[in-house]
Image (spheres, grey):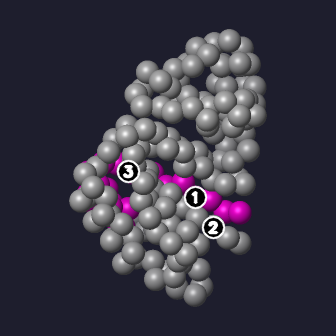
């Protein structure tokens, strides 16, 4: 199986300094000896980090409709620079809410900062997950709580 994972802050608008982002990248490079690329994104607008082909449902918490098509066709083409930008009217039931309140299956995240590891592994056996202590160390460098979005495809 091919896989990729992203590490993003739990607050979508949190941005570390460029120096901190580079230090976090160097840390990741030291954890993963086999990979097809490790990079970071640091942006002044929200970027989308999704679980590739595992990403298939976006559920409105209000009416439980799957609004994946609307999400992909409309939302992902917009730019988001503030939390206010995330407040929208959902097409399923005309309720107003934040895009952060939708249920994403599989994991999906908005963030201004993210680290991405493509097709990585710690060894030939393909042990590829960050350990808890590695994640904690990254959080220390970045200065914020992080979450992992894992993507198999
Ligand atoms: Zn709805």
Foreground residue among 142 and 82: 82
Question: Can residue 129 be seen at all in this image of the molecule?
Answer: no
Which residue matches tag 1?
150
Residue 96 on the magenta span? no
Q: Residue at x 67, y 43 (%)?
A: 105
In the rendered view, tell whether residue 95 sits above or below residue 58. Answer: above
Q: Residue 78: which quarter of the image?
A: top right
Q: Which residues are magenta?
A: 133-153
Please tell me which of labels 1 and 2 falls first in the chain: 2
Whether the residues at callouts 1 and 2 have beta carbons within 8 Å, the answer is yes
Is residue 107 left or right of 37 when viewed as pictured? right
Is residue 119 left or right of 23 when viewed as pictured? right
Which residue matches tag 2?
3
**Where does the image place residue 50, in percent across and percent down from the top left?**
60, 49
Whether the residues at callouts 2 and 3 have beta carbons within 8 Å, the answer is no
Please tell me which of labels 1 and 3 falls first in the chain: 3
Q: Which mark's residue is nearer the viewer, 1 or 3?
A: 3
Q: Residue 5: which quarter of the image?
A: bottom right
Q: CA distance from mark 1 to mark 3?
A: 19 Å
Is residue 143 left or right of 98 when viewed as pictured? left
Residue closest to the far bottom:
124
């Amino acid at each position: 199986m091919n896989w990729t994972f992203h590490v993003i802050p739990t607050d979508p608008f949190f941005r570390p300094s460029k120096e901190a982002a580079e230090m976090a990248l160097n840390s990741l490079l030291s954890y993963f000896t086999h990979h097809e690329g490790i990079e970071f994104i640091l942006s002044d607008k929200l970027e989308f980090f999704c679980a590739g082909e595992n990403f298939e449902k976006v559920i409105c918490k209000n009416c439980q409709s799957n609004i994946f098509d609307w999400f992909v066709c409309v939302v992902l083409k917009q730019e988001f620079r503030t939390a206010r930008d995330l407040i929208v009217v959902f097409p399923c039931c005309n309720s107003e809410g934040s895009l952060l309140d939708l249920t994403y299956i599989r994991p999906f995240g908005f963030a201004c900062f993210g680290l991405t590891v493509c097709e990585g592994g710690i060894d030939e056996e393909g042990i590829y997950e960050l350990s808890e202590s590695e994640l904690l160390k990254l959080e220390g460098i970045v200065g914020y709580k992080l979450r992992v979005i894992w993507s198999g495809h």
